[in-house]
Image (tube, rainbow, N blue to C red):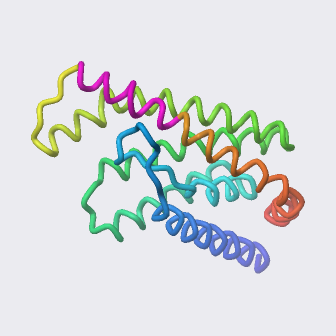
Amino acid sequence: MQSQRSSKLVKLVVLSLLAAISLVLFFISFPLPLLPPYLKVDFSDVPALLAGLIFSPLAGVVVVLIKNLLYFVASGATDPIGVTANFIAGSLFVFPVAYLYRRYQGVKSVVLGLIIGTVGMAVVMSVLNYFIILPAYSILIGMEMNDTIKTGAVLAGVLPFNFIKGIIVSLLFVPVFMKMSEWINQKRMEAL
């Protein structure tokens, strides 16, 4: 009973630390050339990926959620739409990686998860932006947004941005995973 509580406490502490690191990484972002400057790449999903690999896919999503809640509070609660969109995008990216790794382990499952996560994030976020996110922003700022503007924003901004972001984060994460795989497996066994 005592070791079970201790294990849950350790998990909570590790998830909190990973969420805090994720928040710091969220503030370190950069725009991509030729894309709208408000779309910025950051590496805040890397700690969430680690949480997902060590504990569970849900733990990775929880780190994404905590990061976004902390950012929402830290930024003065000015953009609930963007925070929600970031949470959805991060969850779409992290969950397949953690799920496939949990089932099959190894570098191949991580790479396949990153590919699925990147494609899923790009496609789903494009659809959500067209039908929900961009219309919500147009209401928020009081600007009319027709189908042509939404299509242009999705095809020239959202879709390529999410593909490129997924590729950049994946290219960073694969070597990190390969260097840390023994440690990740050790922590995974301890968490079970």
Against 98, residue 109 (above or below) is above
Side of 63 where 83 appears, left or right: left
Task: Using the image as rendered, state which of residue 166 and residue 184 is in the foreground.
Answer: 166
Q: Which residue is depicted at the point 86% across and 61% down?
A: 189
Q: Position of residue 180 (x, y in %)?
A: 83, 60
Give x and y (percent) for residue 4.
Answer: 75, 72
Residue at 84% from the left image edge and 58% from the top image edge: 179
Drawn side of residue 152 relative to residue 53, left or right: left
Viewer can see residue 172: yes
Residue 49, above or below 71: above
Quadrant (top left/top right/bottom left/bottom right) for the N terminus: bottom right
Which of 174 and 2 lies nearest the eye of the viewer?
174
Residue sticking out furthest to the top: 148
| Residues shaded magenta | 148-162
Is-magenta flag for residue 60? no
Say which residue appears at 72% left-offset and 57% top-offset: 55
x and y, in percent, of residue 168 in the image: 62, 44
The location of residue 115, given as percent across then percent down, is: 67, 33
